[in-house]
Amino acid sequence: MSSSKSPKKRPYIKAILWGIVSAGMYIALFVKEDLINEYFGKGGVYALLPILMAFLFSFVHGNFTGLFWSALGVEASKKVKEVK
């Protein structure tokens, strides 16, 4: 059995796209700060908006960060389990 590793394609385009989306979200957050504070401060059902926004930011920024490191070639080490 030959164990030749094929070069892994790096996700440059995906990282750039997720980075643009992430940056756009942060820009929108700061530009529309007054509107966001108005809705988030209403209470009631609107109290869920900050939680949903945090999940959305976490998802988008997490995808960007993971793809960014993959594009740079940084990957988590894979532990090999020894069989005795």
Image: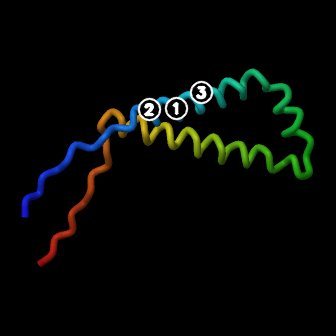
Cα separation, mark 2 vs mark 3, equals 15 Å
For disc 1, the marked residue is 17
Amino acid type at circle 1 is Leu
Instruction: Name the element at disc 1.
Output: helix
Q: Identify the residue at image location x=17%, y=50%.
A: 5
Q: Quadrant of the C terminus?
A: bottom left
Which numbered disc flags the more N-terminal residue, 3 or 1? 1
Q: Position of residue 19 (x, y in %)?
A: 52, 30
Q: Position of residue 73 (x, y in %)?
A: 29, 37
Amino acid type at circle 3 is Ala
Left or right of 81, for residue 62: right
Q: Identify the residue at image location x=80%, y=50%.
A: 48
Q: Position of residue 81 (x, y in %)?
A: 21, 68
Instruction: Name the element at disc 2.
Output: helix
For disc 2, the marked residue is 13
Left or right of 75, for residue 20: right
As rendered, which of 62 and 3 lies closer to the eye? Answer: 3
